[in-house]
Image: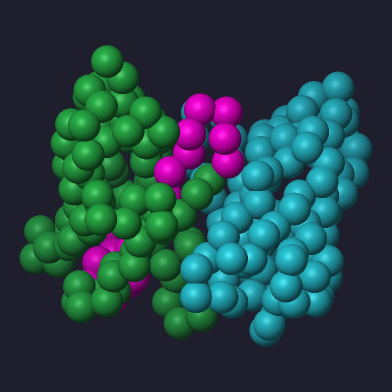
Amino acid sequence: EVVLTQSPGTLSLSPGDRATLSCRTSQTVTNNFLAWHQQRPGQAPRLLIYDASTRATGIPDRFSGSGSGTDFTLTISNLEPEDFAVYYCQQYFSSTWTLGRGTKVEIK
Amino acid sequence: EVQLVESGGALVQPGGSLRLSCAASGFTLSSHWMNWVRQGPGEGLVWVSHINPDGSSISYADSVKGRFTISRDNAKNTVYLQMNSLRAEDTAVYHCVRDGMGTLPWDLWGQGTLVTVSS
């Protein structure tokens, strides 16, 4: 099973700050099949980024994804109040898709 | 509106059974692989099972294999998860999740339904 390690566990920031979230995988991700999902409190998760760097439909451009191999990053520039949430990375290149344990972005 | 709505969650005793349903609307269910993903108290998201569009290909996480059964009725736009021999560690919010088309990952999540296994 491919293990995804997200860091930090919690990020305490203020609106307008820049957030940098990390996701490391235990195996090389082929075809950059790495996604990011956002889960706001009390809401269903939603897809933000796929193929490591492509924004899903309707996702604002302050969200960006980068990386390859085993190291990936989600960057949120200029945090808005609605961005305080938990973010999960997911790999979908192996036969069993797995997610990281999440990074919580909280208001400082 | 494109959405997935789960139902059927409840409080059940260890060893009991429960059937979850996932009603799909706003899109053609029969075009998509579908999944169940669960989230235990204070835990992350864990894949449980998936089923291909016509129901001929199914997989399960080792933790539920032999106890849970996924199925679908495309005519009713519904996906099911039959859960038997429930254990305390099955306590979680269960989300129904859609695979995107082609090589896309999970691209639509339901709100989830809470299953609590306790005596």
Q: Residue at x 34, y 51 (%)?
A: B64
Is residue B63 or residue B49 the one in the foreground?
Answer: B63
Q: Residue at x 48, y 63 (%)?
A: B106
Spot occupied by residue B24 in the image (x, y as percentages of width and height): 25, 55
Q: Residue at x 65, y 45 (%)?
A: A101
**Residue B107 located left or right of residue A58:** left
**Is residue B3 shown above or below B34?**
above
Which chain gets the cyan colouring? A
The span shown in magenta is B25-44
Does the stretch in magenta take in A91?
no
Is residue B104 or residue B19 the one in the foreground?
Answer: B19
Q: How is the image coloured?
A: by chain
Spot occupied by residue A100 in the image (x, y as percentages of width and height): 66, 51
Spot occupied by residue A37 in the image (x, y as percentages of width and height): 61, 52
Q: Residue at x 32, y 33 (%)?
A: B87
Please indicate, yes or no, whether residue B83 appears anywhere in the rendered image. yes
Look at the image and tell me in which quarter the C terminus of chain A lies. Answer: top right
Is residue A108 or residue B60 the one in the foreground?
Answer: B60
Of all residues, the one furthest to the top in this rendering is: B119
Which chain gets the green colouring? B
The image quadrant of residue B101 is bottom left
**Residue B58 located left or right of residue B75:** right
